[in-house]
Image: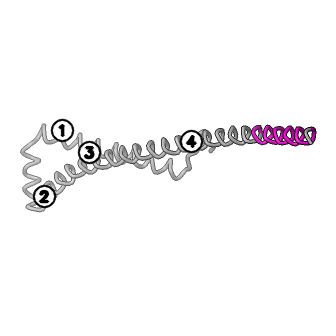
Amino acid sequence: MNLPVAITKGELLKHLLTGGVISAGSVMAYALWHLVESQPQLVLQVVNGWGPLAAIAIGGMLLVDRRFGQVLDVQRDSTSAHQKLADAVKELADRDDHEREEQRRLLSFVGSQQEKILLKLDQVDRNTQARGAHAG
């Protein structure tokens, strides 16, 4: 099977599995919420039957949920900082390239002017020698 984009079968499978797990979790959460709304006494009896382990598990899930949100915020901030750093490095590189090109142009101009000056000096030297030969 040829895919129009550069994605491997393993990556496709990974994304499909992720989507499937998210969908299954959503369906289970909806079913649990519907059960809590329709038969709260039954849910309380089941949770009471689990004992203190249920309370610890629920508390742990709430803690993980809150921490997960904080982790996402930190990751978002970190990604933003990395992007700003990459933009700054690119700007420095572009500026360096521009300055290098400007220096190359200036050196080329100086070199051409130096050649003109040397030609003029040679011409003045020849004229001086020629005058000296006529005078003597």
- Tell me the residue that label 1 is attached to: 34
Disc 4/disc 3 C-alpha distance (Å): 61 Å
Q: Which residue is mark 2?
A: 54
Q: In the rendered structure, which segment of residues is drawn in magenta? A: 116-134
The residue drawn where x is 87% and y is 41% is 126
131 in the magenta segment: yes
Question: Where is 47 relative to 92, above or below?
Answer: below
79 is within the stretch colored magenta: no
Residue at position x 60%, y 44% from top?
100
Q: Quadrant of the C terminus?
A: top right
Q: Which mark is residue 99?
A: 4
Q: Horizontally, is 69 left or right of 122 in the view?
A: left
- Amino acid type at image mark 3: Met
Q: Secondary structure at mark 3?
A: helix
- 10 Å neighbourhood of mark 3: few (<14), some, or many (≥20)? few
- The CA distance from mark 2 to mark 3 is 17 Å
